Image (cartoon, coloured by chain):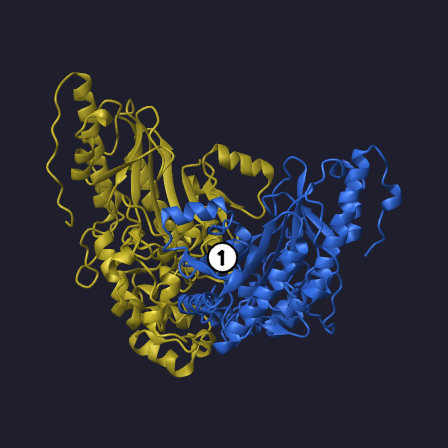
Amino acid sequence: MPFGNTHNKLKMNYSAEQEYPDLSKHNNHMAKVLTPEMYANLRDKETPSGFTLDDVIQTGVDNPGHPFIMTVGCVAGDEETYEVFKELMDPVIEDRHGGYKPTDKHKTDLNSENLQGGDDLDPNYVLSSRVRTGRSIRGFCLPPHCSRGERRAIENLSIESLDALDGDLKGKYYALKNMTEEEQQQLIDDHFLFDKPVSPLLLASGMARDWPDGRGIWHNNNKTFLVWVNEEDHLRVISMQKGGNMREVFTRFCTGLTKIEGLFKEQGHEFMWNEHLGYVLTCPSNLGTGLRAGVHVKLPNLSKHEKFGEILKRLRLQKRGTGGVDTAAVGGVFDISNADRLGFSEVELVQMVVDGVNLLVDMEKRLEAGEGIDDMMPEQK
Amino acid sequence: MASSFSRILSSKRNIGILSLVGGSVTAGFLLHRDHVSAEHVRRRYPASAEFPDLRKHNNCMASNLTPAIYAKLCDKATPNGYTLDMAIQTGVDNPGHPFIKTVGMVAGDEESYEVFADLLDPVIKERHNGYDPKTMKHPTDLDSSKIQSGQFDERYVLSSRVRTGRSIRGLSLPPACTRAERREVERVVVDALSGLKDDLVGKYYSLTQMTEKEQQQLIDDHFLFDKPVSPLLTCAGMARDWPDARGIWHNNEKTFLIWINEEDHTRVISMEKGGNMKRVFDRFCRGLKEVERLIQERGWEFMWNERLGYILTCPSNLGTGLRAGVHVKLPLLSKDPRFSKILDNLRLQKRGTGGVDTAAVGGVFDISNLDRLGQSEVQLVQTVIDGVNYLIECEKRLERGQDIKVPAPIKQFK
């Protein structure tokens, strides 16, 4: 049960076999990994805040998945979930993050000076550039498990920290429940407003409880730096602007994140992070950097090329429609971003996007000119 | 019918359950059925920091939950570990509608109605029009021979139906049950149903194992229930692990139907085309009593007590849990401005023929009893029979160009 851990005791009246979920029609990372033996080993454990195995896997039990898309099927309720339920989480992480081992170490690099180039992605093709990540505040439960009191405390801490930002980062917080109609419309027009989750993947994990209590959006006056509070993670941090200057977007991203981290520390709070998993977030798919750097780019010819998928794969990139995940591309405009999150640093991932998008645009230009691109095929990164 | 909870525990379940909840706590529970302080309720913040924001809410829970009641109950849990926050989650997540007042809370188990009585009693009183669980007793009467004139004019009444729910004592309710408990409910009920005889002989269709053909047949018969999509239900946790341990049983004649593990442990439905409500209710009572006898043979019983009658997940279904209704053609009466008042006074409600929240089609309405608690099954079905007969009389009078009268309001608690 989301939040209510006392219920765990009742399950112990039944054998592990009697409680084991029916995963015969399931296709997600959790279902692939959770054997009856593993279930029996882990089912009587709970984190110090009371998150249980059944809480971790509920979303994966309720959402069998799709034959072609592999969802994760489990979430963390707090930082300790990744430790207490290591036996499940490690193989899920390994499977999801390209073979990342329990002994591997993750590099964090938020020094934007280390990025090479990236300031001149061709604006005739690249319409906008964006980098996002998430952060969790150590000591608080994550969205599937937090109580109303915790969620509000996270909101208050966030507001206090964000209020202290200045310069081009100076901005304002809009609580979802206090927003005026006008403010709401403006945020929608700016493409900033997030909605109550409707995806059953999120709902089944308990993240939407008490909506819209404790949720809100902060953005700077320039509308280039944006923070979502208490949506799928404690914080989602987004840097974005029109055009192809990914370097500037990433620089603001790093500067902003570092400043925010400093401001939280002043209040005695730090972000959840460790050497092995990097930044700790609700969904195992977002561990490490939690970073998705992407562009909206016009690739009408290349996207029709038979090797498009293969090229993206080799560049370690993924495509989405311009409405975000699970949407279709419109007018040959694609959202192209890094496929990885863990095992590469922030700089490395943004570099892959910069280099990769430059190549894709060059290929598009060749195809426009009626020429081939076979000589441009990249190696597998 | 009302045996003590402790008898069931000692005869049927492992005593191990209780020892796991906590030794002294267990003894305390058996001795005086008092609510239990949960051992592990994690509370870093005071009740005032956790109290939900209900300013935009319009449901019975929000109308009755004060900060004082919240503070008193928030650290308590039922012996099964169900907490107040769980009980009210659906009402917090679903503010409601300005015109329709939803209940806004559920029970996770039978004990919820005791442990959270400080909130549930006023909610029940509001929802059931003044029924006070602290002072009143609910009458149960499944003797269908008492029904008078239960055959409707079939030029108007197209079909007749009676439904209720039953919960298996000792197992948690759908918002809170574990997978094993839910499977146990399924096993107990299906096992009992296999003992039914004569016109009640039937078959079980598990949702997880249904064939395509069986599924299509059940859809064509209008028997199949879907995974709940209403946020009122999903926010309460009832749809977890779908479709595990859910299924539909019906008799070969397709006049007696049981849903397993949907919104309640069981929903029991008797129905047929035409206007023979007496026969529908006869079968209803007979079937229910048979099923009860069969589960008792196996050492189980239904959740029931004198205060609240049959215990179900939603407080709105306490008492009889009974909705007796017809699909009836009232094209003229339904356009008369006095229609709503007439229904009100007869203690009836209208719905479209798709069920709750649907619109009427072709002047055909679903007319059923408003009340659930405080009157017996026989009384409620008689109310529907008398009321629908009155409505048909009105329709006939309007057909003949005669005027109709709004009847005097029926007294509520008999």
**Amino acid beneath label 1:** His
Residue A325: x and y in percent read 61, 48
Q: Quick one: B195 or A82, which is closer to the camera?
A: A82
Q: Quadrant of the N terminus of chain B?
A: bottom left
Rendered hue of chain A is blue
Residue A332: x and y in percent read 68, 37
Q: From the image, tell me which residue sits under label 1.
A: A219
**Residue A17 quadrant:** bottom right
Q: Is residue A172 toward the left or the right of residue B136 in the image?
A: right
Residue B296: x and y in percent read 39, 59
Query: For the residue labelled by badge 1, is the local secondary structure a helix, a strand or a loop?
Result: strand
Position of residue A146 relative to residue B201, above or below, is: below
The residue lying at 71 percent from left, 70 percent from top is A107
Chain that appears yellow: B
Q: Count residues near mark 1 (Cα–Cα under 10 Å), then give few for <14, some for 14-19, many for 20+.
A: many
Q: Quick one: A352 or A310, which is closer to the camera?
A: A352
Q: Quick one: A9 or B96, which is closer to the camera?
A: B96
Chain on which label 1 sits:
A
